[in-house]
């Protein structure tokens, strides 16, 4: 697992409401019970952690439909981090 | 039970992104004008991601206040006093004794003197100065607008601020209405004020991720959120007998007030709480759902509010919901937080008085979740005997006022 992946998992694990003892890349966001404010807080934590900007409007974006799994979030963050380091 | 008096409105005042008087505001609303534009008020506006807000434009404090008085007034209190003076002038009341001590001043504000907050924080944190201006505290306190109106207009009765975020003004006017109705006071100057377009506040709203980048389109398909606004609106309330005895022009009647708390989510709207506030206002006003023709919706333009408010309107009004003309004037003046309810009640009172429902502008077409009549894009002539103005706040605090055509 990459460093980015373990950091993303740690951030999502903090916000999940499903009381899963360990969050994994294969977990579906829907099953983790993330609510709308949780998503906003999670995105803030990701931006702060990786010094990236994640375009997100709570009215039009739905993380549960745009990112099916934790792994999808990891991939998106990795792409933004790579872009930043270009 | 508490209704010793019928409560009428005899003066209106407003400072808004669409004009600095109630009349110019109302004419612009009827024309479907937009008060939205680029953010200019903060010295660091180019750093903001959000570029658009509904600012009060070309407001020159020197037109309204002596230079030495301006150093005592945050922008929010300037708006509040200018609107209150207009409302009082229209009412024709002179607040001498004993009326002065029998008049309440109740003013809603969500966040208080934000310009003073922002400027003083910038001085100490960015410019590393050791001093802030001497009147920083009495300018930024949330009761400053109420205190400044009381001082400027000589009102010596109960005076205080009401804070319930986006419902502040509606709660304030509702309380003033109850005090006049019960005979606790003989008159009230009430409304709301906000001047929240500062760097720190806009940053805070950016972090919530609920603002539209360009246009506020309440209840429309493809709506992308709210746009911040600012301003103040004030009104004079008095018992019907008193207004009649002095031959005052009666602009409308405040008939009912409903309040509720969701006790649920911090920010997500709650249908049950909305319905209880609307039903409470109707019952208080002794109105049946079918008696109402117009609703000035909370209508922030967020996905969640407009969807939930539509469901709540269905539940509160039943089949009659389909017949209501519903509009969100926030589409034209943005969301002025603690002042919003007052700006919207002024619009509601004038809609009833003139028989015109102001439009919801920026409307692109129906969203399946919002299936009512939102008076899209064009004002509509309509006989209105009774109307309602909704305010639903973060923190799950809801307030609704019902008004009647005065006859």
Image (spheres, coloured by chain):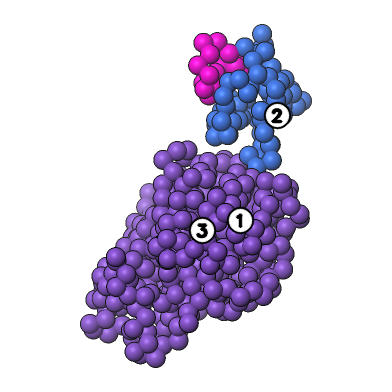
Chain colours: A blue, B purple
The image quadrant of residue B333 is bottom right
**Residue B405 visible, this angle:** yes
Q: Position of residue B262 (x, y in %)?
A: 44, 43
Q: Are marks 3 and 2 on the same chain?
A: no
Say which residue appears at 63% left-offset and 70% top-offset: B357
- Out of B44 and B227, give the one closest to the viewer: B227
* Nearer-N-terminus badge (1/3): 1
How many labels, in total?
3
Q: Which residue is mark 3?
A: B390
What's the magenta bit mostly, secondary-structure-wise?
helix
Residue designated by label 2: A65
Residue at image coords 68%, 64%: B375
Select label 2 or label 1 by which is in front. Answer: 1
State the CA–CA distance, disc 1 to disc 3.
19 Å
Between circles 3 and 2, the one closer to the viewer is 3
Provide the chain ID for the residue under circle 3. Answer: B
Distance from Cα at disc 3 to Cα at disc 2: 32 Å
10 Å crowding of disc 3: few (<14), some (14-19), many (20+): many
Q: Residues within 10 Å of mark 2 (few under 14, many from 20)?
A: few
Q: Secondary structure at mark 1?
A: helix
Side of B15 relative to A8 (left or right): left
Residue annotated with mark 1: B319
Q: Chain of mark 2?
A: A
Tell me the crowding category of disc 1: few under 14, some 14 to 19, or many 20 or more residues within 10 angstroms, Cα based.
Answer: few
In the drawing, what numbered circle is on residue B263?
A: none
Magenta span:
A4-23
Q: Looking at the image, do the residues carrying marks 1 and 3 touch, with CB atoms under 8 Å apart?
A: no
Q: Looking at the image, which residue is at 47% across and 79% down? A: B406
Q: Do the residues under discs 2 and 1 have CB atoms within 8 angstroms?
A: no
Say whether residue B56 is left or right of residue B272. Answer: right
């Amino acid at each position: 697992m990459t460093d980015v992946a373990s950091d993303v998992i740690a951030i999502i694990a903090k916000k999940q409401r499903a009381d899963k003892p360990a969050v994994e890349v294969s977990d579906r966001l829907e099953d983790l019970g993330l609510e709308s404010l949780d998503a906003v807080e999670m995105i803030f934590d990701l931006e702060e952690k990786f010094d990236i900007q994640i375009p997100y409007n709570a009215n039009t974006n739905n993380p549960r439909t745009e990112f099916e799994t934790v792994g999808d979030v990891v991939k998106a963050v990795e792409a933004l981090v790579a872009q930043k380091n270009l | 039970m508490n209704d010793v008096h019928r409560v009428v409105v005899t003066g209106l005042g407003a400072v808004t992104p669409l004009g600095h008087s109630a009349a110019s505001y109302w004419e612009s609303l009827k024309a479907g004008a937009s008060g939205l534009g680029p953010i200019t008020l903060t010295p660091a506006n180019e750093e903001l991601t959000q570029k658009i807000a509904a600012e009060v434009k070309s407001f020159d404090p020197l037109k309204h206040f002596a230079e030495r008085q301006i150093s005592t007034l945050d922008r929010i209190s300037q708006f509040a006093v200018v609107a209150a003076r207009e409302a009082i002038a229209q009412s024709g009341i002179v607040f001498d004794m004993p009326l002065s001590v029998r008049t309440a001043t109740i003013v809603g504000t969500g966040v208080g003197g934000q310009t003073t907050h922002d400027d003083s924080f910038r001085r100490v944190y960015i410019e590393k100065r050791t001093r802030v201006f001497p009147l920083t505290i009495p300018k930024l306190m949330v009761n400053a607008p109420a205190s400044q109106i009381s001082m400027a207009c000589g009102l010596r009765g109960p005076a205080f601020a009401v804070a319930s975020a986006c419902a502040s003004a509606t709660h304030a006017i509702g309380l003033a209405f109850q005090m006049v109705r019960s005979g606790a006071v003989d008159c009230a100057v009430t409304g709301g004020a906000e001047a929240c377009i500062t760097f720190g506040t806009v940053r805070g709203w950016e972090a919530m991720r609920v603002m539209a980048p360009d246009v506020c389109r309440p209840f429309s398909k493809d709506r992308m959120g709210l746009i911040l606004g600012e301003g103040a609106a004030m009104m004079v309330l008095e018992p019907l007998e008193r207004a009649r005895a002095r031959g005052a022009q009666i602009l409308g009647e405040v008939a009912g007030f409903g309040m509720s708390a969701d006790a649920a989510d911090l920010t997500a709207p709650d249908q049950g709480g909305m319905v209880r506030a609307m039903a409470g206002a109707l019952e208080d006003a002794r109105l049946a759902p079918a008696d109402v023709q117009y609703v000035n919706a909370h209508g922030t333009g967020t996905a969640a509010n407009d969807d939930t408010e539509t469901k709540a309107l269905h539940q509160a009004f039943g089949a009659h919901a389909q017949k209501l003309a519903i509009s969100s004037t926030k589409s034209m003046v943005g969301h002025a937080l603690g002042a919003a309810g007052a700006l919207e009640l002024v619009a509601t009172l004038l809609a009833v008085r003139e028989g015109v429902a102001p439009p919801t502008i920026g409307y692109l077409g129906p969203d399946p979740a919002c299936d009512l009549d939102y008076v899209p894009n064009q004002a509509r002539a309509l006989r209105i005997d009774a109307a309602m103005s909704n305010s639903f706040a973060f923190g799950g605090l809801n307030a609704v006022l019902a008004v009647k055509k005065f006859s």
